[in-house]
Amino acid sequence: MSSPHIRRVLIAGGGIGGIAAAVALQQRGIESLVFERAPQLRDGGAGLHLWTNGMLALDHMGLADRVREIAPAQETCHFATSSGRLIGDWPVGRFTTRYGQPTVAIGRSDLHAVLRDCLETPVRTGAEVSGYTEHEDGVTVRFADGTEETGDLLIGADGVHSAVRRGLLGPEPPDYTGYIAWRGHGRVDPAVVAPGTFRALFGPGTRFTYYDIAPGVVHWMSVANGPAGGRDQGTPEQTLAMLRDRHRGWTGPVDEVLAATDPESVIRSDVVDRSPDPVWGRGRVTLLGDAAHAISFNIGQGACQAIEDALVLAQRLAAVDCASAGELQAALRAYESERQQRTAPMQKLARRIGRMGAMENRMGVWARDRLLRYAWPQAFRAAERDHVAYGTRWAASVSA
């Protein structure tokens, strides 16, 4: 179904959420223009987790097969202490049989490329949003270089520091979680890290997660508590040496993974999120992805939720009979209401898990690990029920 009365949708942000929205709208016959403030399109060298609900959403867009060609499917997610003591296993491989799609790991830039290759219109780069004005029959976006673009509506998919969000809801910054993530990747022999591996290790005030994102390529993340706004001193090689010191004595193959890492691949970022917001939009303007519901990495659903947002928004807009202000605003508010109910619990859950992972006190860590071992089977069932099974709305058929 298409909505020819919507002439053009403006999308701020050329990341995964923005490109996914453009593709989803394109598949509904709705034209869009994506603009990105960076001078060239790039979506980082980090890896990401795509749960089965995200894969089902991509399958609905006709893209799951392309992802499966390059993204290792995971059979079991392992969680353990820094010494290697098992906390719990999540048998995510069973999702393939139950829902028709696996849980996978993929390079962020690789997923971005899969989405971008489907987009028929070029992304306008070097387009930094400086403001926007809503008028009777549309929205005009102003850019820092003095140019403007006009469309029927505006989607702010420009990340956690969204300029559209700032114009819509004010300059309140995201919340700093109290911890920092270092990410990198290296070439690791499959004998050391088997294909389809996912492992998360918990230590006092620090964590280490690793998984393969391509044959022989392992993405990892080291997390530690600290003040916001810090910078690593010295060379990339010295930063990597610092990380190896941090995780010295941890269960294998942590040191082997770090030793195989290209120092130039290591990036550092403060981990931020937001509490759920009751308002995502006004008039002809709405938000999508991290701009709307920044979710920390702790539940691996950030990219999945941005893709789901894109599909629901496209579905709502395709049902619009005309591009009148009333019709469009009703469609946007319906999208926001539906997605707020989905994403708000995830924002809260990710924050709680992050706080547990950040514990430093030895007795607290001991109690946490015991609690996690007890709760992990129930947590897996809840993750399937509350997160994964939602994706069946996109599935053509579901195994019993």
Image (cartoon, rainbow, N blue to C red):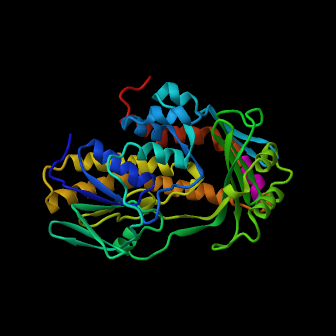
- Residue 86 in the image: x percent, y percent? 75, 40
* Left or right of 387, for residue 184: right
Q: Determine which quarter of the picture holds residue 230.
A: bottom right
Observer-nearest residue: 237 or 353? 237
Q: Determine which quarter of the picture holds residue 192.
A: top right
The residue drawn where x is 15% and y is 69% is 136
Observer-nearest residue: 205 or 366? 205
Q: Determine which quarter of the picture holds residue 248.
A: bottom right
The residue drawn where x is 49% and y is 27% is 98
Observer-nearest residue: 144 or 51? 144
- Residue 166 in the image: x percent, y percent? 39, 73
Q: Which residues are magenta?
A: 364-370
Observer-nearest residue: 90 or 218? 218
Q: Magenta: predominant secondary structure element?
A: helix
Residue occupying the far right of the picture = 249
- Residue 182 in the image: x percent, y percent? 68, 59
Residue 252 on the magenta segment: no
The residue drawn where x is 48% and y is 48% is 112
Above or below, 248 against 135 in this view is above
- Residue 105 in the image: x percent, y percent? 58, 41
For the N terminus, the quadrant is: top left
For the C terminus, the quadrant is: top left
* Left or right of 266, for residue 100: left
Residue occupying the far top of the picture = 400
* Left or right of 380, for residue 242: right
